[in-house]
Image: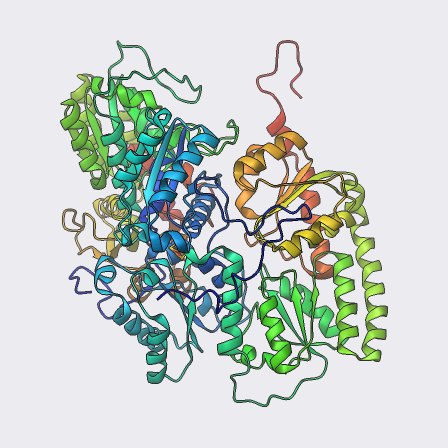
Amino acid sequence: MTNPTNANKTRHYEGNPQKNSPALGATLAYLGINGLLALLHGSQGCSSFIRLQLSRHYKEPIPLNSTALLEDSVIFGGWEHLKKGIEVAADKYKPQIIGVMSTGLTETYGDDMVSALSSLRSERPDLKELPIVLSSTPDYMGSMQEGYQRTVEALLTTLAGPSSKTLEPSGSKFNSTFNDVSVPSIALLPGCHLTPGDVDELKEIVMEFGFSPITIPDLSISLDGHAELEAAPVVQGGTLLEDFQRLSKCKACLSFGLSMETSGEILKRTHEIPHHNFPSITGLAASDEFVLTLAKLSSKPIPEKLLRQRSRLLDTLADYHDQLGSLKTAIALEMDLLYSLASCLVEVGAEISVALAASRAGIHKLSLPIPIEVGDLETLEERGGRSRLIIANSNGRQAAGVLKLPHLRAGLPVFDWVGYPQKCWIGYSGTQQFLFDTLNSLS
Amino acid sequence: MFTNLTKLDLKDKKCMSDAGSPKLCMKALPGEGAERSCAYDGARVVLMPITDAAHLVHGPIACAGNSWDNRGARSSGSQLFRRGLTTDIMENDVIYGGETKLKDSILEIAANHDPKAIFVYATCVSSLIGDDVEKICQEAETELTIPVIAVNCPGFLGDKNIGNRIAGEVLYDRVIGTGSGPSEKIPLSINLIGEYNIAGDLWGVLPDLKNLGIKLQTAITGDAKFEDLRSAHRASLNVLICSKSLTNLVRKMEIRYGIPFMEGSFYGIHDTSETLIKIAKALGDPDLLERTLVYVGKKEEETRKVIAGYKALLENKQAVLFTGGVKTWSMVSTLAELGINILAGGTQNSTPEDFQRMKELMDPSAQIIEDTSSAGFLKIIAEKKPDLIVAGGKTKYLAHKTRTPFLDINHGRKLPYAGYEGMITFAETLTRTVLSPVWGHLRRKFPPKEGEQVD
Ligand code: SF4
């Protein structure tokens, strides 16, 4: 591969990958939609591995079905299996919506999901009304971030359009849908670099300005790890289906992470609402920009609470400026999270020694003082030596062990530190927490 | 390059759908939600614990990326096996083929990591685009001084069991008996087959073997070094642990090397003793047998004394047993030892034989779980309202939502449960789980109804 941005020029294999499969990213996006049944079009191994990986990160059951392809369908195409899969899932589990994602296997032999779906709908007229989203996520293109991004785009294109049919409110007690028309709504599109804890905070901040947020997908009320939920094989909590139809009434759309920019543009086009993309909302300047945008959109002053948080953050910066300034960090993460955390560290005077992204997406659009390269965790091990800290997902533990360096867990999977999905590293107080966690991981 | 299944002796077996066992080898229905994983997963479970070998997955990120270093197999030496290595097939490789990249990767890994052997796993996409993994491995081998072994296990061939068997074939064809050392039998030596040293299980059994004067030639493949596996044919006896899926391997070893085999399990007091006695008998040394009888008697007494306190606390608790693995029947007797009743039992990846065995061991009133999907599992829990759930890690977080005490017995666990020591650990952990105060908090209604006391 002659990729100029690839860090391991001398290697053809991937050693200790930091990537996750795009289909895993797709699953994650689907897991934020209430009443959805996720169906992976592929063999059962892929879905098993995704369930395990997400499960050990979130400590939650992961509802994910597959079309269970076997050798015969590989030879003759999986078209019929896909139809059958949707049918069985719809009949057995009665989901409100089905989300399908493809895999390397089905994309390699070119299964046409769209035509499979329309053929099924003509055979089963009773399924015509069931919303079905198709997301194309071949394993050999990109990482988790790309799969998540494509799936949010597919969700919006399929469900956010002007619709003739009005959906009955399903009135789940877990969703904070505001039906009060006097409260202006705002659409939030969080990228997969944000934890359920981050998304929670995001909504809080927006509500401080008097907005009612519609969050797509909303992991903060599906994968937040609460015990109040009865278990079921479909997603419980998350964005309500009828929320998609309220999107047209939104005052604006805010998207988070560069990977969510296209999704925001889709909403902008469809509903003619303004769109703002925030590549990061971790760090002082990034939080300032976010808060100022909200103030402008709401024509309200910045709430006292947020100003207070900002002033606390400033105090922290002063108190720890020397420790932060002497930090030298090697980071390997998916692009949006890499950029968010690294730019925050740079902003407070820390040095980034190595920046390795899981895939190429956004690599030419976002910049740090040093070039961002695509790389695996074996590269981190080879190049992280002169740093004081490693920031990577839990799989970075082998590199950290070899280099004898402290290792701040971030990204996915994080399975050997507790509470990561509930962590909040965005906004003023989240940024403060991130800096605390960073400094504490050194001791 | 499609695998010739008839050659692998996989498709000729008829399903045992009679005698009340669910149709275990029935194909999973699309969309149904069964969780049987894939052949590649089955092969890696068997081969990846080989500690000083490199394991290269020829496929896109889906196969290795989501799964490397995620099993609890432990090593006393090399940690190379834990490294995630993949060719990470990209779009270009899909179009132009991935053989060159594979060859380069093999050579680079040999240079960078100094493995004793390299196993190369073919997966769905690499098979579909027609990469000849076998040929590339042969080519690479001529340029290297170590074996480069193709494992042809694309996931679409079937479930984990099929992958286990493929791995067994690979060990038989390419590893066992290939060393340059002597090949005469070592007296009183055994191989433990299907023991992967999860959470250090093997280390719980080794002291007993040592005390009895039995030599472990190698485990297949827990904490195994490649060289030891090569001389696995020098063992006097093969002991198949808990699983039928490597039966093909021991059968073939019996024919070629004259090594008899037996089945055994080191889960629970009863099974541990029985297995040790069976080993002693099979090794045919009267002295050893006598020693073993005395030894297990003493060990049983010691162990029972220690677990008596736990048993008193667990007696008559009602359990649902649900494993994704193959230890189900062994777990039935382990739970019985602690006085626990089994209300319902189910298993996903066991062979029909394993399954029948479990059924025989359970109380006739115990229900067999037929629907092994999450939905089926939840239904059983709702119906049976057990005091505890003993299951594989996959079910863990689902079980927690039912607010029922849960114990993980599969690869996700941190503690060894094998042997007499393991039984004590198991009883201790189970008691801690069942008696944990958290379940009470989970079940208490809040806020209390008017007039009720908050306790
Ligand atoms: S089913 Fe195929 S593509 Fe999926 S993990 Fe298994 S081998 Fe890889």
Q: Nearer the viewer, residue B125 or A84?
A: A84
Q: Quadrant of residue A179?
A: top left
* As drawn, A117 above or below A103: above
Residue A404 placement, left or right of B266: left
Q: Quadrant of ligand 1?
A: bottom left
In the rendered image, residue A76, in percent from the top left (x then y), is placed at 34, 52
Image spot of residue A246 (x, y percent)? 26, 18
The quadrant of the picture occupied by the C terminus of chain B is top right
Q: Position of residue A416 (x, y in %)?
A: 47, 50
Report if residue A317 is visible in the image: no
Locate the N terminus of chain B and report the quarter of the image it occupies: bottom left
Quarter of the image holding residue B405? top right
The quadrant holding residue B112 is: bottom left
Residue at 75%, 50% (x, y): give it.
B361
Q: Is residue B61 left or right of residue B214?
A: left
* B55 or A75, nearer to the observer: A75
Q: How is the image coloured?
A: rainbow
Residue A207 position in % (x across, y down): 30, 20
At horizontal 22% and vertical 33% (from top left) the residue drawn is A255
Rendered view: A360 above or below A313: below
Tell me if I can see residue B235 in this picture.
yes
- Residue for point 58% across, 37% down: B377
* Front residue (pair A189, A157): A157
